[in-house]
Structure formats: structure tokens, C-alpha cells
Amino acid sequence: MDITIRPARDEELDEVGELTAEAYLRDGLLDFGEDDPYLDTLRAARRRALHTEVLVAAEAASERVLGAVAFVGDGGEYADIAGPGEGEFRMLAVRAEGRGRGAGEALVRACVERARERGLRRLLLCSHERMTSAHRLYARLGFVRIPERDWEPLPSMALRAYALEL
């Protein structure tokens, strides 16, 4: 594989925030487009890095960041649905040129490894209902739908919950 998964470097965090915002905009996941207030949260990778482990998928040769994810291993303000003994990952995003190269899958697998290393019993995620290709990836990796944990951060945004038993 020509992709390396590693913690984001301090000098990459602004890029990670922009990459994440751009991916959400490109995929039509923000109800208000460029005016969506959630863009500020997506761009705030520096803040996210204070409360989560921000991982990047980088091209092995060039170190160019292709994607990123926030791994939440111990609750806190970035845990949307995880409870005791559960981890969660959020804000998974891959640049257009990183898609189809395994960057997203490698980031998810890294989150699974981290959850196992911490002795967690379950890894959770929430995904927008329109992210059907991501849903196929999650299913292939063993995640199952847990509709009882679905939720809506906004009345017009339904998020589907998935879990992987560790």
C-alpha cells in the first residue's frame, strides 16, 4: 500500500480542517452548503486534536495528506454516542484524489486497532444516510447497524449509528 496512517502533525492540522470541510461540502452533507455553521467545527482540527487523536492517511512517498479521522477513545465532548467501554470515530474525510486508493479503509482500520489496544469492547460511528459507499465499507469491515443509537443533531439531519464488537 502506498498510504501510511499516522498521527497528524501540528503543521498539518489546518490542512486537515480544510480537507474535512471540503469533503463534507463535496459530498453534500451540509444542509446550508458554504453557509453551514458546522463548517467551523469541521475546520477546527486544532481544537479537535486537543480532545481526540487526529489520524491522517498520507502518501508514503510524498507525505501528502489524503484523508483524516478523529478517534475518540475515552469519551469527552467529541463522543456523540459512545458510552463507557466504547470508542468512536468522527469526521472521516478523504480528498477526491485519495478515494479508491484505500485511504478511508486504512483510517477506519487504524481506529479499530486503537480501540482494541485500549481494551474497549465496541467501536461506534455515526454516518449521514446519504453516505452509501461508506456504509458498504463499514459493513465489509464488520460494523453493523444499531438503529436504537441513531440520532439527529439537527431536525433535518438523520445520522445512522454503526458498531463493531471488539
Image (tube, rainbow, N blue to C red):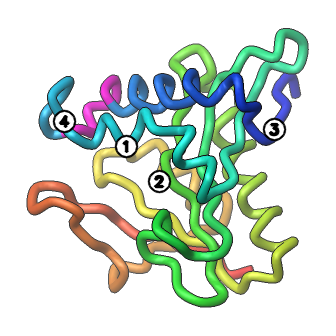
Between the residue at mark 1 and the residue at mark 3, the CA separation in whole angstroms equals 23 Å
Q: In this view, does 64 lie above or below 88?
A: above
- Amino acid bearing label 4: Asp
Q: Name the residue under label 3.
A: 5
Secondary structure beneath dot 2 equals helix
Q: In which quarter of the image is residue 68?
A: top right
Between the residue at mark 4 and the residue at mark 2, the CA separation in whole angstroms equals 24 Å
| Residue 22 picture location, percent across and down | 40, 23
Farthest-out residue, top: 62
| Residue 20 picture location, percent across and down | 47, 32
- Amino acid bearing label 1: Thr
Between the residue at mark 1 and the residue at mark 4, the CA separation in whole angstroms equals 10 Å
First reached walking from the N terminus: tag 1 or tag 2? 1
Q: Residues within 10 Å of mark 4 (few under 14, many from 20)?
A: few
Between the residue at mark 3 and the residue at mark 4, the CA separation in whole angstroms equals 30 Å
Q: Name the residue under label 1.
A: 41
Question: In this picture, which residue range is highlighted in magenta?
Answer: 25-30
64 on left or right of 125: right
Q: Name the residue under label 4.
A: 36
Identify which residue, 71 or 112, lies in the foreground: 71
Q: Which residue is drawn at 42% across and 28% down?
A: 23
First reached walking from the N terminus: tag 1 or tag 3? 3
Q: Which residue is drawn at 9% across and 62% down?
A: 155
First reached walking from the N terminus: tag 3 or tag 4? 3
- Dominant secondary structure, magenta: loop
Secondary structure beneath dot 3 equals strand
Q: Name the residue under label 2.
A: 135
The answer to whether marks 1 and 3 mark residues whose Cβ atoms lie closer than 8 Å is no
Secondary structure beneath dot 1 equals helix
> Does the rendering let one see residue 53?
yes
117 on left or right of 67: right
Q: Which of marks 4 and 2 is in front?
A: 4
